[in-house]
């Protein structure tokens, strides 16, 4: 049976995905996932029979609905569709796809805007982690304005800015900012920092693996011994971070950190978790930035820098540029008292196509 679904294809930050209204998809999770696999063309390394882009960063889905909560406008559920396996997972959030949620919500009339408004602040409840974000979307004559001069590394062209503020993301998947209770743990003889400020991430010093930290993503992906070693550490870290068996989950992410090369604070290469990110995830970078400022973490020890209370801007270097995270922090010298009050960052988003997506379903 040929099924069609109203669908938007959007770039959100450095990712790309399909955006749907919740009411346009089956409510039954199994039926919904089966449909999404068909629409994306998974499982298939090339996703040749679907809309997926044959990479985890372009095989993503946002499901959006009017919020059932008082303080937010819309609910956003993120789903990662595995490229080469019949898997659809809600175990992680995605801050890049989040950048397209505000524009999509306005396009679909879930948020009302006036003709004279310059921008709309869309309050988004992120269903995967139960936390909230506010996205500032630029408007022109009551419609979303995608055109502008904002640039983000990893995207060749400029677009209108989407400013995102996160308020309550600490421990969003693991229950605590430092889920093991430590700034540093040793796993399989390697010192690691396990952190969750919006995204569970394990930080590792690149030097401990005989790496400079400047390797290209495909060099790292083709180093089989390295990938196996990092995956072994990840499986143990997952248990220690309250995530259970993570063998089929896309969290935690594994970030190799090293000294910066281009004026940033820290340099990264991030396994997400089996491919290496061409840049770095949004919430992944918030977690890395947070680890930089707390004394005693793998990142902070590498930097040998201390931070006072107040606003800090951490520039996280990655394979295609830098990612800037602004944070308000308190007590960066004490693990038990350390708080990140707010994290803010800049993304852009662009509507690429809207129409109907077709799938041949049984
Ligand atoms: O960390 C990739 C991405 C992401 C997730 C990943 C993300 C985030 O770049 O918030 O954005 O780590 O799987 O889209």
Image (cartoon, grey):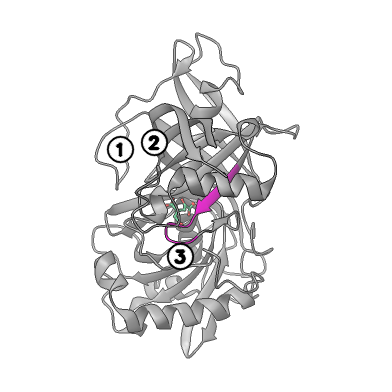
Q: Quadrant of residue 206?
A: bottom left
Q: Position of residue 42 (x, y in %)?
A: 45, 53
Instruction: Indicate the quadrant containing the C terminus: top left, top right, bottom left or bottom right.
Output: top right
Q: Position of residue 129 (x, y in %)?
A: 64, 52
Residue 79 is covered by the magenta coloring: yes
Q: Name the residue nearer the viewer: 166 or 354.
A: 354
Residue 60 is covered by the magenta coloring: no
Magenta segment: 77-85
Q: Name the residue nearer the viewer: 307 or 208.
A: 208
Badge 2: few (under 14), some or many (20 or more) residues near its Cα, within 10 Å? many
Secondary structure of the residue carrying tag 1 is loop
Q: CA distance from mark 1 to mark 3?
A: 24 Å
The image's mark for residue 292 is 3
Number of callouts: 3
Q: Is label 2 in contact with label 1 (beta carbons under 8 Å)?
A: yes
- Residue mark closest to the camera, 1 vs 3: 1
The image's mark for residue 151 is 1
**In the rendered view, does 310 fall on the left or right side of 83?**
right
**In the rendered view, does 4 fall on the left or right side of 255?**
right
Q: Which residue is mark 2?
A: 348
Q: Name the residue nearer the viewer: 90 or 293.
A: 90
């Amino acid at each position: 049976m040929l099924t069609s679904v109203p669908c938007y294809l959007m770039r959100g930050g450095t990712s790309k995905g399909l955006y749907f209204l919740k009411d346009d998809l089956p409510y039954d999770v199994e039926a919904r996932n089966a449909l999404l696999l068909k629409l994306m063309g998974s499982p298939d390394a090339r996703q040749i029979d679907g809309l997926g882009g044959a990479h985890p960063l372009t095989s993503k889905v946002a499901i959006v609905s009017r919020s059932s909560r008082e303080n937010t406008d819309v609910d956003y559920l993120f789903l990662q569709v595995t490229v080469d396996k019949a898997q659809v997972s809600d175990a992680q959030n995605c801050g890049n796809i989040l950048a397209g949620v505000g524009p999509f919500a306005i396009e679909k009339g879930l948020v009302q805007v006036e003709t004279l408004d310059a921008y709309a602040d869309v309050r988004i409840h992120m269903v995967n982690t139960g936390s909230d974000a506010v996205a500032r979307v630029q408007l022109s004559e009551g419609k979303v304005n995608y055109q502008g001069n904002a640039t983000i590394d990893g995207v060749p062209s400029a677009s209108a800015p989407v400013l995102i503020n996160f308020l309550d993301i600490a421990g969003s998947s693991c229950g605590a900012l430092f889920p093991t209770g430590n700034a540093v743990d040793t796993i399989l003889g390697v010192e690691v920092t396990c952190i969750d400020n919006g995204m569970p991430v394990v930080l590792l010093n690149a030097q401990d693996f005989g790496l400079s930290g400047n390797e290209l993503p495909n060099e790292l992906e083709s180093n089989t011994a390295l990938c196996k070693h990092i995956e072994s550490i990840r499986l143990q870290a997952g248990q220690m971070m309250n995530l259970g068996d993570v063998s089929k989950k896309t969290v935690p992410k594994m970030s190799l950190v090293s000294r910066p090369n281009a004026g940033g604070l820290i340099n990264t290469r991030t396994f997400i978790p089996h491919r290496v990110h061409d840049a770095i995830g949004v919430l992944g970078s918030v977690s890395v930035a947070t680890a930089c400022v707390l004394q005693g973490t793998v990142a902070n020890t590498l930097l040998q820098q201390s931070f006072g209370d107040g606003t800090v801007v951490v520039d996280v270097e990655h394979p295609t540029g830098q990612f800037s995270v602004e944070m308000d922090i308190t007590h960066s010298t004490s693990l038990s008292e350390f708080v990140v009050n707010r994290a803010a960052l800049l993304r852009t988003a662009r509507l690429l196509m809207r129409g109907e997506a077709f799938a041949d379903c049984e």
